[in-house]
């Protein structure tokens, strides 16, 4: 439960309002937990958790159900994942995995795990703007991206997959 309230409604009534916590993401700790949008751990098997984004690489300690595990890296990662998923290039292959390598590096993976995006949280906003500006050039090369590295200031590194052609 996120919140509960009761109030008296005159002349002879009572109004009870309950607000339930809803699953928002899966987080890998000692096992996979489900957390709500405030970072509170809800349990290990809650609803249809397979469709939720997954967060890995977290170094949380002393956690238990009902505790808040959302730190600054998790919040930044989920916000950036949401922003990236608004782009047309991820429309058919959404980003659904956030791996927090360290305080200075986050890796995003698409649903099919075929494309990765590397980013430094401290320059995330600037990197996202640069990515939006470069989208036309990136998309002209095709959808077969191996990774996009947004870790550098004022620079985007894009690696396309190369198909190995063999003749027999």
Image (cartoon, grey):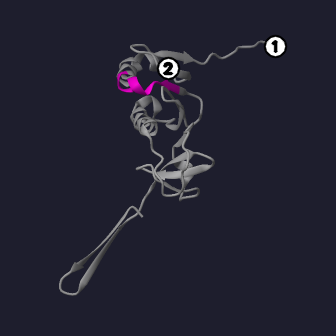
Could you tell whether 82 is left or right of 147 in the image?
A: left
Rendered residue at 42%/64% (across/down): 1
Rendered residue at 39%/61% (across/down): 2
Q: Is residue 149 magenta-colored?
A: no
Q: Which mark is residue 149?
A: 2
Could you tell whether 3 is left or right of 168 in the image?
A: left
Magenta residues, as a range?
117-126
CA distance for labels 2 and 1: 36 Å
Q: Which mark is residue 46?
A: none
Percent across and percent down for residue 161 are 60, 19
- Label 1's element? loop
In front here: 145 or 72? Answer: 72
Neighbour tally class for label 2: few under 14, some 14-19, many 20 plus, Cα within 10 Å:
some
Above or below for 131 versus 65: above
Mark 1 — residue?
Answer: 168
Please tell me which of labels 2 and 1 falls first in the chain: 2
Percent across and percent down for residue 85 are 43, 35
Percent across and percent down for residue 168 are 81, 13
Neighbour tally class for label 1: few under 14, some 14-19, many 20 plus, Cα within 10 Å:
few
In front here: 45 or 85? Answer: 45
Q: Residue furthest bottom?
A: 12
Q: Is residue 121 magenta-colored?
A: yes
């Amino acid at each position: 439960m996120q919140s509960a309230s009761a109030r008296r409604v005159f002349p002879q009534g009572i109004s009870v309002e309950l607000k339930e916590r809803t699953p928002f993401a899966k987080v890998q700790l000692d096992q996979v937990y489900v957390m709500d949008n405030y970072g509170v751990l809800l349990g290990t098997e809650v609803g249809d958790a397979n469709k939720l984004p997954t967060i890995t690489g977290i170094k949380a300690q002393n956690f238990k159900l009902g505790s808040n595990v959302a730190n600054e890296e998790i919040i930044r990662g989920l916000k950036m994942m949401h922003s990236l998923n608004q782009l047309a290039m991820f429309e058919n292959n959404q980003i659904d995995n956030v791996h927090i390598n360290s305080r200075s590096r986050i890796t995003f993976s698409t649903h099919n795990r075929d494309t990765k995006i590397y980013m430094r949280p401290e320059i995330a906003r600037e990197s996202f703007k640069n990515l939006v500006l470069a989208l036309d050039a990136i998309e002209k090369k095709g959808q077969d991206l191996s990774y996009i590295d947004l870790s550098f200031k004022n620079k985007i590194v894009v690696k396309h997959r190369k198909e190995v052609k063999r003749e027999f």
